[in-house]
Image (tube, helix red, strand yellow):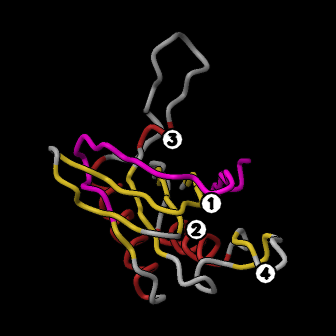
C-alpha cells in the first residue's frame, strides 16, 4: 500500500461539481492499493500516518503529529500510485489491486483512522474527482507499507 501524504492548511474534493469532502488543517492522503495488500498493510500505514511528526511545534520545528494538532484527514483513492512507466509511454497498472479488493482495503484504512478519533473525509471511490489543496510548507511524504522506498 502506498500513500502520498501532504500537510495542508485546507483541502477539498469535488465530484460532478459537488463538494463531497473537505478539511481544514490536516493531511491530504492519496492512497494506492497493491494487488497483494492486506489488512496489515492498512494497519501499518494508518498508524504511521497518524503518528508522523510533521506539524510544527511552538519553536517551528516539525515535532507534532496529526492527533496532537487536532488535524483532519482527507483520503483519496489513487490506483495510479501503482502505475509502472518503465516500459513505453503509457503506464501499466497491472500491480494495482482490483477495484473490489481496493475498495475493501480503502474502506478498512478509513475506518482505522476514524477509530482513532480523527475527523476523516473521503472522495468517492472509482469516480472522477477534482481535488484541491493548500499545501502547508510545502510538506509531502511518500510512504509504502512494504518499505520499497
Q: Is residue 96 above or below residue 141?
A: above
Mark 2 highlights which residue? 45
Q: Are marks 2 and 1 in contact (CB under 8 Å)?
A: yes
Q: Give residue 58's position: percent from left, percent from top.
A: 78, 81
Q: Quadrant of the N terminus?
A: bottom right
Number of numbered discs overlaid on the protein picture: 4
Q: Earlier in the sequence, mark 3 or mark 4?
A: 4
Residue 10 in the image: x percent, y percent? Answer: 46, 61
Mark 4 surroundings within 10 Å by alpha-carbon count, few (fewer than 14), some (14 through 19), many (20 or more): few
Q: Is residue 136 magenta?
A: yes
Contact flag, marks 2 and 3 (Cβ < 8 Å): no
What span is colored magenta in the figure?
Answer: 122-149
Q: Residues within 10 Å of mark 1 (few under 14, many from 20)?
A: many
**How far separated are the C-alphas under marks 2 and 1?**
6 Å
Q: Which residue is mark 1?
A: 145
Residue assigned mark 3:
81
Marks 4, 1: nearer the viewer? 4
Name the mark on residue 58. Answer: 4
Q: Earlier in the sequence, mark 4 or mark 1?
A: 4
Quarter of the figure with residue 94: top left
Amino acid at each position: 500500500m502506498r500513500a502520498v501524504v501532504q500537510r495542508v492548511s485546507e483541502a477539498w474534493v469535488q465530484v460532478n461539481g459537488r463538494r463531497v469532502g473537505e478539511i481544514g488543517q490536516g493531511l491530504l492522503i492519496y492512497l494506492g492499493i497493491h494487488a497483494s495488500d492486506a489488512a496489515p498493510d492498512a494497519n501499518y500505514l494508518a498508524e504511521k500516518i497518524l503518528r508522523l511528526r510533521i506539524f510544527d511545534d511552538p519553536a517551528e520545528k516539525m515535532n507534532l503529529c496529526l492527533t496532537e494538532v487536532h488535524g483532519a484527514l482527507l483520503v483519496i483513492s489513487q490506483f495510479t500510485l501503482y502505475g509502472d512507466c518503465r516500459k513505453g509511454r503509457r503506464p501499466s497498472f497491472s500491480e494495482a489491486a482490483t477495484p473490489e479488493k481496493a475498495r475493501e482495503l480503502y474502506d478498512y484504512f478509513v475506518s482505522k483512522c476514524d477509530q482513532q478519533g480523527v475527523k476523516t473525509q473521503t472522495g468517492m471511490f472509482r469516480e472522477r474527482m477534482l481535488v484541491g489543496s493548500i499545501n502547508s510548507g510545502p510538506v509531502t511524504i511518500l510512504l509504502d507499507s512494504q518499505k520499497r522506498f
